[in-house]
Image: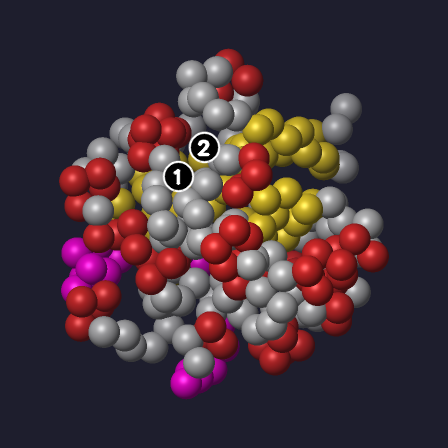
């Protein structure tokens, strides 16, 4: 059964209950960082929780009162920093760690994660690299539904995981390392024949992401690119074609 997407770009949370079904994805506008949520009636799954700022009212609107599972690609602050916001996190009941980052980090970061009970999940496809001196190269690669989430995985790691079947059938790509030129290689794009949309969770004005080289690669492949910096929170609903 074929699937397709409706993209809703909303600056107010109030219409969402009526506009979306019970299952959708949100790429939150967090500046330079990443926080992507899969939202369903009883559960939210959060793929990284970092950035420069956070749309807490909208996040609470979507996920308060539900089970909240956290999947962390790696230890970088722009992927885990929201875990330090204890007051705002209180409204996300049932917050638990479904996928911890690989290896070790600073004492402070490890303490943040120890506050979360474990709820390890095995129902999503995940590729985990070997330990590496480069924290970006330690990124878990996940896919949730049609959305591929490569963390900050660089090209050297993309070459190792790009041929997996669950990677190849992805329809939406959240750009690796916020669109840095070290990720989203031509080799990776060549293995994504069903890709319909790419998303950059980044800030060009300050960090120059997504890099023009990556933008050119996507343009060459005729893959649309949306940026949270331009459009705010991006809400994606997956529907079954009739």
Element type where label 2 sits in the image:
loop
Can residue 171 be seen here? The reply is yes
Can residue 164 be seen here? The reply is no
Between 133 and 241, the residue placed more toward the observer is: 133
Q: Residue at x 36, y 50 (%)?
A: 52
Image quarter (top left, top right, bottom left or bottom right) of the C terminus: top right
Q: Which corner quadrant of the image does residue 161 belong to?
A: bottom right
Q: Is residue 179 magenta?
A: no
Pointers 1 and 2 in contact (CB under 8 A)?
A: yes
Q: Is residue 115 magenta?
A: yes
Position of 132 relative to 72 (above/below): below
Task: Specify whether 173 is left or right of 66.
Answer: right
Q: Residue 40's mark?
A: 2
- Tell me the magenta residue range: 111-133
| Residue 235 percent location from the top left of the image | 54, 33
The residue labelled by disc 1 is 44
């Amino acid at each position: 059964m074929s699937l397709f997407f409706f993209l809703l770009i909303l600056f107010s949370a109030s219409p969402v209950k009526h506009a979306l079904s019970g299952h959708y994805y949100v790429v939150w506008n967090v500046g330079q960082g990443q926080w992507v949520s899969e939202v369903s009636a009883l559960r939210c799954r959060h793929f990284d929780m970092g950035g420069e700022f956070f749309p807490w009212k909208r996040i609470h609107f979507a996920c308060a009162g539900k089970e909240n599972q956290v999947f962390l690609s790696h230890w970088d602050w722009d992927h885990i920093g929201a875990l330090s916001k204890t007051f705002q996190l209180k409204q996300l009941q049932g917050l638990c760690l479904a996928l911890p980052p690989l290896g070790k980090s600073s004492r402070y970061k490890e303490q943040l994660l120890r506050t979360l009970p474990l709820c390890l999940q095995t129902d999503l496809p995940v590729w985990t690299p070997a330990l590496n001196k480069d924290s970006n190269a330690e990124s878990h690669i996940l896919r949730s539904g049609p959305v591929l989430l490569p963390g900050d995985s660089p090209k050297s790691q993309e070459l190792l995981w790009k041929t997996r079947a669950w990677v190849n059938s992805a329809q939406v790509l959240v750009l690796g390392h916020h669109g840095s030129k070290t990720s989203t290689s031509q080799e990776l794009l060549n293995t994504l024949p069903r890709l319909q949309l790419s998303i950059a969770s980044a800030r060009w004005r300050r960090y120059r992401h997504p890099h023009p080289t990556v933008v050119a690669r996507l343009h060459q492949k005729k893959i649309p690119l949306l940026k949270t910096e331009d459009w705010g929170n991006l809400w994606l609903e997956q529907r079954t074609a009739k």
